[in-house]
Image: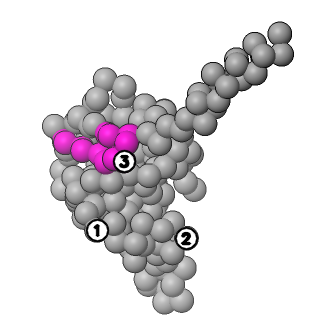
Amino acid sequence: MKLKSILYILMLLPFLWSCNNEDDVEEIFASGTWHVVDFYGKANWDKRNGEPKYNAMAHNPDKTIAAEGRKALDIIHGFNITFKADGTFTGSIQNGTIEGTWQADGKARTVNINFTKTPSSTSYNNEFIEALNNAIFYQGDSNVLLLAPEGKKTYIQFAHNKQD
């Protein structure tokens, strides 16, 4: 009896020690609507050292720059995207909606986003669309999502909760 128990434990050990380094892409991407937090620079793919573009402007001592930053945050906090399990996405940006297709590789942590519909051009819309078009890498979980281009020096951050 004791020998049987030891054998069962030994048979289970590989399962207990096995580790899956692959992200659950559907849990991350297709887990609801993602809202833009900010665009980050000087990040080097490090959330602690990323410099928020519009949040930094909104807190600038120069009142004109601060007002521009607050206006920008009001606009981009209205941007959202919903990745669907079927590989499509929809979203809202300034003055319109977006649609397209997406795919992600949970092992390589890469993403590919293609637009099939975009609204009229504004500087904020263009920045958002460019960030998604150039996104190659992602990191995140079901609460926060970061998308970065080649080089990972900048990224766009999303959260499930709309920013105020």
Asked whether residue 84 is drawn in magenta, I would say no
The residue range painted magenta reads 104-115
Going by the numbered disc 1, the residue's amino acid type is Gly
Rendered image quadrant of residue 87: top left
Against 151, is 14 above or below?
above
Q: Give the colour scheme of this rendering.
A: one colour
Give the numbered dot on residue 48: 2
Going by the numbered disc 3, the residue's amino acid type is Arg
The secondary element bearing badge 1 is classed as loop
Instruction: Measure how far apart labels 1 and 2 are at the Cα level.
Output: 17 Å
The secondary element bearing badge 3 is classed as loop
Question: Which is in the foreground here, disc 1 or disc 2?
Answer: 1
Q: Which residue is mark 3?
A: 109
Give the numbered dot on residue 151: 1
**First in residue order: circle 1 vs circle 2:** 2
Instruction: Measure how far apart labels 1 and 3 are at the Cα level.
Output: 14 Å
Residue 118 visible in rendering: yes
Packing grade of label 1 (10 A; few <14, some 14-19, many >=20) is few
Main secondary structure type of the part rendered in magenta: strand
